[in-house]
Structures are given as C-alpha cells and as structure tokens.
Image (tube, rainbow, N blue to C red):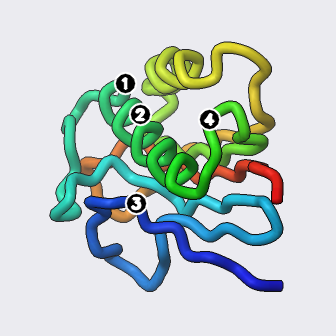
Amino acid sequence: MPKTIITPPGTSIPIAPFVPGTLADGVVYVSGTLPFDKDNNVVHVGDAAAQTRHVLETIKSVIVAAGGTMDDVTFNSIFITDWSNYAAVNAVYADYFPGEKPARFCIQCGLVKPDALVEIASVAHIGK
C-alpha cells in the first residue's frame, strides 16, 4: 500500500525518528504531538489549556495538509502528566470537536520533556 508523508510548512525537525503524519488509503495517522515551537522548545509552560490548543492546532495543520479537516478525526490518544489538568484539556478539546466527538482514550504518564503537560496522537479518515 502506498503512503505519503505529511509535513506541513514550518514543521520543526522531529526530536526522534518519526514524521508529523502519514496518509495511507485515505487515513491520516498523526504522530504524538507535543506543545513544541519550531525549535522543539515547550510552549506555554504550566498552562495545560494553552498547550492543548497548541497541540490541536499542530494536529489540525497536519490533517489540513493531507486534505482533511478536524471533522474527519475519528480517534485521539491523549496523554497527560497530571489528572489535575484533565478539565482544562477537555475544555479546549471540546472547542475543536463541537459536534460528533471522535473516539478516544486518555492516560496519565510521563512525557519526553518535563514541561510538556499534554500529548495527543490522532487518526483521521479523509477518504481516497
């Protein structure tokens, strides 16, 4: 099955061996996305809502670059460092998915950079 690497304009060089997204058979797989600026520094330190918004905007850029919209997202994997940020993450998340919600899970865990409070990976079905 052929696949296309999706790298939106302005994307930073990943800190590990991965790409921002992959399109295969009408499905966009968005890598785990952290609240990083173009130099891979954590943005909005200490603000889970702002970090979530940054992460979802980054995910949106990958999906749009592949030809889709956030309405095409069918699944999200959410990782947070502390359950005390759960409400803030959900409030921003609801802004990006106001209608029918994608399936998802959310777990508490450590992330690759200590100042990162949230990471999200997504799957979107944009058709063929």
Please identify, in this view, whether the residue under mark 4 or under mark 1 is nearer the observer.
Answer: 4
How far across and how far down the image is residue 55, in percent? 41, 42
At x 34% / y 74%, what residue is drawn? 14
Disc 2 marks a residue whose amino acid type is Thr
Please identify, in this view, whether the residue under mark 4 or under mark 2 is nearer the observer.
Answer: 4
Disc 3 marks a residue whose amino acid type is Pro
Q: CA distance from mark 4 to mark 3?
A: 15 Å
Check disc 2 and report its element: helix, strand or loop: helix
Please identify, in this view, whether the residue under mark 1 or under mark 3 is nearer the observer.
Answer: 3
Q: Choose the circle earlier in sequence order: 4 or 2.
A: 2
Q: Are marks 1 and 2 in contact (CB under 8 Å)?
A: yes
Check disc 3 and report its element: helix, strand or loop: loop
At x 41% / y 38%, what residue is drawn? 57
Please identify, in this view, whether the residue under mark 2 or under mark 3 is nearer the observer.
Answer: 3
Q: Choose the circle earlier in sequence order: 4 or 3.
A: 3
Check disc 1 and report its element: helix, strand or loop: helix
Which residue bears the numbered disc 1? 49
Which residue bears the numbered disc 2? 52
At x 82% / y 59%, what residue is drawn? 128
Residue 37 is left or right of residue 51, and the answer is: left
